[in-house]
Image (cartoon, rainbow, N blue to C red):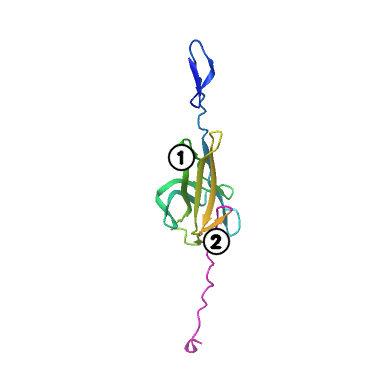
Amino acid sequence: VSVFINGIQGAKEVDGDIVFQNRYKPITPVGVVVDGKKTFDGKVPEDGAFTFELYNATVLGEEMVISGDAINTKTTTNGVFTFDRIGYSSLENIGEHYYAVKEKIDDSATQIIYDTSVYFVKVTVSEDNDRNLVATTKIIKDGETVEQISFANETKPTPPPVTPRLTSSEY
């Protein structure tokens, strides 16, 4: 058997069988956890008092929009909500993925002014030289990059009581 390296015959001849040993390193998966903070009247709210939803999102032109129904729903614990881990485990996941986070508004809670912000999370999945998937995240609110997701609700102010006025004929 003659050995060829880059199309050029090498000086070494081998007798017998040649065994090629290929090594395959599987892709190492990666995941991201989307979470956020919540305040109510500037304080940590009661556990379970507020609900948040995670949606798939898409980019249409220059705009990010929610697509479909909520894919995960969580309530607050100690002023924090944390969605389930989003996993990426194959080369098909390489690219950009978009999600949206918003608070679920309870229409029966008429004394609450809800924070109606929508946060978008851009996850970029890539592969490093060691066949590890790598994910980076960017949080966007109103077209600007922000450090964290944070919602703040307030109690609606109670209007002052109306004092009846007497007319001159009622004196």
Region rendered in magenta: 147-171
Q: Residue 154 carries which label?
A: 2
Identify the disc placed on residue 165: none
- Sooner in the amino-acid sequence: mark 2 or mark 1: 1
36 vs 55, left or right, is right
Q: Residues within 10 Å of mark 2 (few under 14, many from 20)?
A: some
Q: What residue type is labelled 1?
A: Asn
Q: At 54% across and 47% down in the image, what residue appears? A: 137
Total numbered labels placed on residues in the image: 2
Identify residue for label 1.
Answer: 93
Residue 27 in the magenta stretch? The answer is no
The picture places residue 126, in percent across and down from the top left corner, at: 51, 41
Question: Tag 2's secondary structure?
Answer: strand
- State the image coordinates of residue 125 (x, y, percent, origin top left): 50, 42
Q: Which amino acid does label 2 sit on?
A: Glu
**In the depicted structure, whether residue 54 falls above or below residue 141:** above
The residue positioned 51% from the left and 45% from the top of the image is 124
Residue, far left: 68
Task: Compute the Cα span from label 2 to label 1.
Answer: 40 Å
168 vs 47: above or below: below
